[in-house]
Image: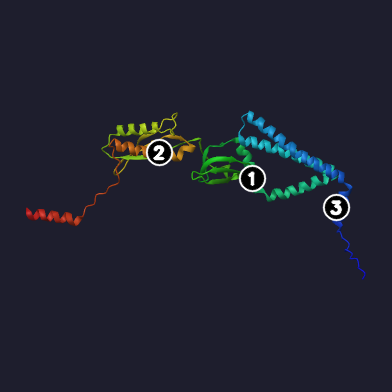
Amino acid sequence: MEKTATTLPPVVHTPWQDKLIEYVIAHAGGLISALVIIIVGLVVARWLGRLIDQWCERKSMDIPVRTLLVRIVKLLVFLGAVVVALGTAGMDLTLLIAGVSVAGVGIGLAMQGVLGNLFAGLTIIFTKPFRLGEYIEILNVQGQVTTIELLSVTLVHPDRSRVVIPNRKIIGEILHNYGAIRQLELTVGVAYGTDLNQAFQTIGEVLKANPRVLREFDPIVGVTMLGNSSINIAVKPWVSVNDFGPAGAEIYQAIVNQFRGRKIEIPFPQHEVRLLNQVQSADNARLTNF
């Protein structure tokens, strides 16, 4: 029994596939050289980026400025390597530049928000309205600055959540920059019969004993309001941003303990209630006895 040989159908290439194969065959050497140039460009860009970063660090430049310079240098080196590689591969750079220009106009119109964030980021980096590690309040949000990027700024809220603000929202807004320190605003109430000098002395001792309270700034301690049942004393020491949360709780606890030990009363709200019917009955009884 004779075996019939099976023949595969011929491979049919579309015109663009044929042109691509012809181009690869004709420019094989150039394509390999272009690939090598791109790889070398990546290596040089990383090496030069590390070199620029080390130089900026020796000059004590801010981290956002260092990051920006490193990225610009790496991008320029890589783009230069890509242009050289395309020319080596046999592409017409004139047509390529014209096409990129036309595409750039359309991309720019479609990315107006991104470009606005970019220019705002450059403004923030060079004008320095705030720095990394500082505590700021803007747009009804607040937190410690952790990153300053070209497109956004990231804050860490006191509850440890992150707040990301687009840079274009920051420029032109009212910014409250606390810096690296903050002032606590505590209030302690004492009874009207309390010796205020003793209360002030006790609070001062508590503040001096707390290691979180900054010594280079004198705390504010004084009467802030005469309440219905207490004299309210304002306690406003300065602490670092990182100690703002725990310092208040520690100071309150220490004040309560010291007041109890020294018999300084912390009153609670009290209301006197009189029953009119009972008062009238008592008055009638006195008149009858009279």
71 sits left or right of 162 in the view: right
Q: Nearer the viewer, mark 1 or mark 2?
A: 2
- The residue under the point 18% across, 57% down is 277
Q: Position of residue 236 (x, y in %)?
A: 40, 36
152 sits left or right of 108 in the view: left
Which amino acid, by three-letter code, is at mark 3? Answer: Leu
Q: Nearer the viewer, mark 3 or mark 1?
A: 3
Label 1 residue SS: helix
Q: Label 3 vs label 2: CA separation? A: 74 Å
Q: Mark 1 or 2 closer to N-term?
A: 1
Count of labels shown?
3
Task: Please state which of residues 9 and 124 is positioned toward the viewer in this rendering.
Answer: 9
Q: Mark 3 or 2 closer to N-term?
A: 3
Which amino acid, by three-letter code, is at mark 1? Answer: Gly
Q: Mark 3 or 1 closer to N-term?
A: 3
**Residue under numbered circle 1:** 116
**Residue under numbered circle 3:** 20
**Residue under numbered circle 2:** 250
- The residue under the point 17% across, 54% down is 279
